[in-house]
Image: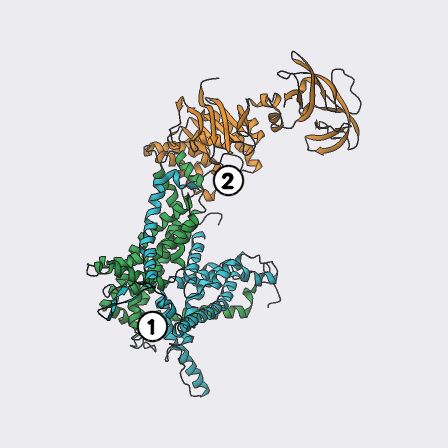
Amino acid sequence: MENWKDSRSVFWTLATPGTLWMFLFFLIPLGFLFVMSFGGKAVIDGQVSITEYDFFPPGLENYIRSFEFTYLRIMWKSIWVSALATALCLVTAYPIAFGICFAPAKWKPLLLLLVILPFWINLLIRTYALIAVFRTQGYVNLTLGWLFGLVGIEFEPLVMLNNNFAVIFGLVYVFMPFMVLPLYATIERLDRSSSKPALISAPRNSPRFLKSRCRLPCQASSPVSFSSSSHALVRS
Amino acid sequence: MSEAIVSIKNVSKRFPGGVVAVDNVSIDIAQNEFFALLGPSGCGKTTLLRMISGLETPTGGQIMIGGEDMALTPPNKRPTNMVFQSYAVFPHMTVEDNVSYGLRVTGVPSDETKRRTAEALEMVKLSHLAARKPDQMSGGQRQRVALARALVKRPKVLLLDEPLSALDAKLRDGMRMELTRLQETVGITFIIVTHDQDEALSMASRIAVMDKGAVQQIATPSELYEHPASRFVADFIGKVNLIDAKVLRSVGKHISCEAKGLGKLDLESTGTTGGTVSIAVRPEKLKIGKAEPKAANLIKVEGKVRDVAYYGDTSHVVVSTKDGLDLSINVQNDSREGGAGVERGQKVWVHWSPADSLVLAE
Amino acid sequence: MAATLKPGQGPLDYGNRWWLKLLFGFIFFMLYVPIVTLVAFSFNSDKRGIVWRGFTIDNYAKAWKNDALIEALTNSIVIAIIATIIATVIGAMVAIMLWRFRFPFKGAYEGFMALPIVIPEICMGVALLLFFNESGMMSAVVNTPWPINLSNIIIAHVAFCFPFVAVVVRSRLVGFNRQLEEASKDLGASEWQTFWKVLVPFMMPGLVAGALLAFTLSLDDFVITFFTSGPETVTFPVKVYSLVRRGVSPEINAASTVLIVITIVATVLAMKLQAPEKSGKG
């Protein structure tokens, strides 16, 4: 690695665009958000304005308000929904990763492709596709209705949309593939002849696994795994 | 010796942080020489080679190539080309594109590029693999690509950085002969960096032995082997028995000394007048016998065989004297029976001619 | 079945256990059923898309005639292409800089560059909305002709895409043998020739993967775009969101299918382009 002083012109040419972009369109906006978090809506002529802000004097009212029950409840819900979704992602991703590892060699690339493919499909489209499955006249309810009809029991369609079930299922559905790749990479690296306990416990202790487990699936984990999946792409 | 093509004058390289890799080195390398820079790893030989190529800048001294000072000439403008230790063959190009690269980037006309590339490939016997990619080739073949790629530029000097170190033993012997043949055909100066004395001895016409950034001795292979200038060179080139001795008296070219385990000896020596010296004797110059040799004027000592190692053509015997001196002896196994003819624990006499011993100053 | 081992299999070859196969199949089924039905029902003649009433491509025609939908789709693709180009160039430059140079506070700088990867999208979206509003950039572009009115969204997309490109390209650069650069210079190439003829070809798989990542991230983004788009600059995800709120329609299925096909084709093409040629050694 060279010292930047050895070729300053090259260094600055390479560094300027990215740094500038990050400052202008990332750091400054976030700083803006931060400064504003201490302000409030401006009061002009005794009326609370909708568009104008007032930063002076800075205060902590917004932060105090964020501890109100309403907000705390939302935050808490975010956390437990994320935690549950992560756990379910793990439960579903593990057999897939395991299965791919032990699949015949000629099937592996295809199976991996099948896991990666949903990455490239628009998130909103994938989520939208779920509506058709879970709505009152969706496939689940239609199938259940048909089954109940066979037995001759009256069937009341289940409500599976716009509730916690839908949110969690959606999260698992969308983010599960992100978990398969790191798991697959870890299991694949283990020696097949290694002892059974190692095979079962080692992935769980691997830093990569912990990383994907500790991240909230709805936020940070997606890009992280996304980038790791593309690493796999680059290196393959 | 004809006029020097590469002239290195008092060159030093001090890295930031204070490490002195090359310390005040001066070497003149003649036209058409096969010159080797030999030394243990970290002795500065590669740094010196890289300074000749321009990939590293000296912090002191002057490097002249073909009579021109190279101080301000960047590597891409120097009349030198390098074969890298890792070969550094471009992985995304075919063999042909690799070889023609140096011509294409410098604007050589395309028909000439084609002709010269074909010639270079012919020379390293790779014409049939011109369309291959490097990852489909063996180490030895990649090495040839690197050679052809450098030679196609018709440099005044070809620099080779440990060219054989990544090859397996069998390929290495073949490549060694190939390099010598190539050097004779193309008739340009080769400078090779190596840590392997066999490589240097068998290929080079002259060798510079380096240690800790400084040149220890510059000489032909046989001179280096038979007349090493220092204890380091004697020890580094081939195997040697080094016996400590104390100079008692010196008269002209003769010294009288007290050697450890051997008693008083009269030897020929130039340049040593007193103090402690090392007496160096090559293992193959020592003779071993069961009885005390009759001839006068031999250096002889009695000892016990401590170890015998059989190597097929020779056996290596280690004899310990009662004063704790260990002597290694190479014995030719010239009959099918018996090998070295001695056994471990046996009492033997070791003797050699004083002319075969060399007195080295510390 | 589980007790007898075939040659070449260890006792831990769970691939042959029927229950694992079943579970495996079931999860894959769950993964693909929604997507497959979405595609299938884009050819359904039933207006409400609940039961299969026969094959038709009317939905595609309808989607094609739906100006708002087509406009959103074009916006999305144009934004993605431009943002990808800019993000790939900037990301690659950052990657080369981080790979090649030592400089003070490098660790802090790397952390700074990774921020857009870890920060919640919603924060970035809100922050950018405030910034564009307050700096006057929003009002500056709002009445400009297409596609200049997309520039705010493009700027935002580049900001969250290029750090990903940098990560991918840099991981590729780590494997670069610097003696290749030296060899190139030694053979007479200038710094610039060396960059284009040696470094760029080596980076190519990383550049393709990075660009692909940026393209999908941009095409995929809903949250940040939702905050930075105006009524004239709706993108496809934003449009789908607003339409879905009014209910499912086969037109959306059709348009979604088109987008799926575009992304898959782009992915496969890019993978083909970057795939190393099969060598004799396999």
* CB atoms of marks 2 and 1 within 8 Å: no
- In the rendering, at what x and y percent does residue A31 appear? 34, 58
Label 2 and label 1: CA atoms lie apart by: 57 Å
At label 1, counting other C-alpha atoms closer than 10 Å, the crowd grade (few under 14, some 14-19, many 20 or more) is many
Indicate the position of residue C181 as horizontal and vertical percent values. 41, 39
Q: Secondary structure at mark 2?
A: helix
The residue wearing badge 1 is C41
Query: Taking the image as drawn, is residue C56 in sight?
Result: no
Seen at 78% across and 20% down, the residue is B293
Residue B105: x and y in percent read 35, 36
Q: Is residue C93 left or right of residue C10?
A: left
* Chain with colour cyan in the figure: A
Whether residue B39 sits left or right of residue A129 in the image: it is right
Say if residue B249 shows up in the picture: yes
Q: Chain letter for orange?
A: B
Q: Which residue is label 2 attached to? A: B139
The colour of chain C is green
